[in-house]
Amino acid sequence: MPEPPLTGVASNKTGILLINLGTPDAPRRAELKRYLAEFLSDPRIVEIPPIIWWPILHGIILTVRPAKSARKYASIWDAQEGSPLMFHTRKQAGLLDGWLRDKISTPYAVEFGMRYGNPSVASALERLSTAGCQRILCVPMYPQFASSSSGSALDAVYQYQLRRRNQPDIRTLRDFHADPGYINALADNVRQYWAQHGRPQILVISFHGIPERSVKQGDPYQQQTQTTGRMLAQILGLDDKRYRICYQSRFGPAKWIGPATDDTLAELGKNGCGRVDVVCPGFAADCLETLEEIAMEGREIFLEAGGKEYHYIPALNENPNWISALGQLVLQNLQGWISIR
């Protein structure tokens, strides 16, 4: 009889884990309450002492906000595929797997996990471990590094490691805000949209915002978003008068980095800008913040202020140029772990 495999023996299989923010299981109040409770309990998201924050969170926010958020999610929820962030991330993982198949000769596996909600980062790491992966590259799907996004995603990885006796080797991709493949994919995505719909007077480049306090404490996010925005504008041939870089999704009373996207859109509409296009380079996949806040609320703000024509340019999603750029990033960060065909 063949000898049974020895437990604890290292495998040469390599895992690739894509990590995104997360999504509720359904666009209903109960599911949103669970999701928001996990999200807003993360000290990377809300940097207020728990003794002050928890009564506010559980006494006010989780009583009022879930129903409102559920209505917003319902407005973007796909009847067949569910949450846009979920199905785009799942498709990206599958496409990356297919792209790598012709490039890597050693065994590997691709999974995705969500920082909040399901499937969790821990469950995805466990699936890779069960598949025999003793070496795992973790890729937060945030091009620009922020403590509240990439930092929190990697916290979930390290928390999994704390509970493991036989820990896998871990590598992490910190950010890719100035990666040429990523920038070119963004530019090609915009050009493809303009080829079908014409060009705007102004391109608004909108990123998720963070509190000013985070920047003062050393967060590189604002600098990296400015770099991404300028590189994108340059490759598109836009001078300073043809684009704006701004920030969306303000939350709470703290002062956030600016200018704010909603204020920028209102100003452009009021000043007689006939057409504005908005692109969100900080999101690798469309989600609530792009499809509802930007595509819907942003349109309303611009048109009500006097603007004439508003376009949201979809995120990279399953764009082949983006999948190729992502694949190249993965290969660069797997050097020494894999063999290339």
Image: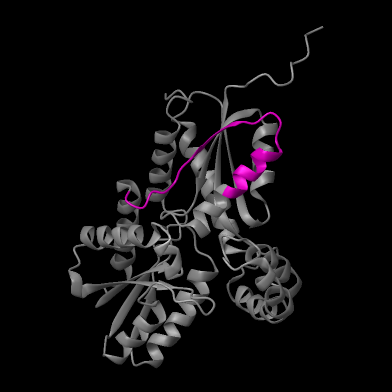
**Residue drawn at the location 37% of the way across and 63% of the way down:** 222
Percent position of residue 208, x then y: 45, 67
Q: Nearer the viewer, residue 288 or 144?
A: 144
The magenta stretch spans which residues?
Answer: 155-178
Percent position of residue 3, x then y: 78, 9
Q: Quadrant of the C terminus?
A: top left
Rendering colour mode: one colour
Q: Is residue 2 magenta?
A: no
Query: Is residue 132 shown left or right of residue 225?
Result: right
Q: Nearer the viewer, residue 172 or 111?
A: 172
| Direction top: furthest residue | 1
Compared with 239, 132 (above or below) is above
Q: Quadrant of residue 2?
A: top right
Q: Nearer the viewer, residue 158 or 70?
A: 158
**Residue drawn at the location 56% of the way across and 65% of the way down:** 47
Q: Quadrant of the N terminus?
A: top right
Percent position of residue 140, x then y: 50, 49
Q: Nearer the viewer, residue 182 or 172?
A: 172
Percent position of residue 241, x then y: 19, 75
**Residue drawn at the location 22% of the way across and 73% of the way down:** 242
Compared with 111, 91 (above or below) is below
Compared with 301, 16 (above or below) is above
Q: Is residue 163 magenta?
A: yes
Residue 335 visible here: yes
Compared with 83, 11 (above or below) is above
Q: Quadrant of residue 51?
A: bottom right
Q: How many marks?
A: 0
Residue 82 visible here: no
**Residue drawn at the location 27% of the way across and 85% of the way down:** 273
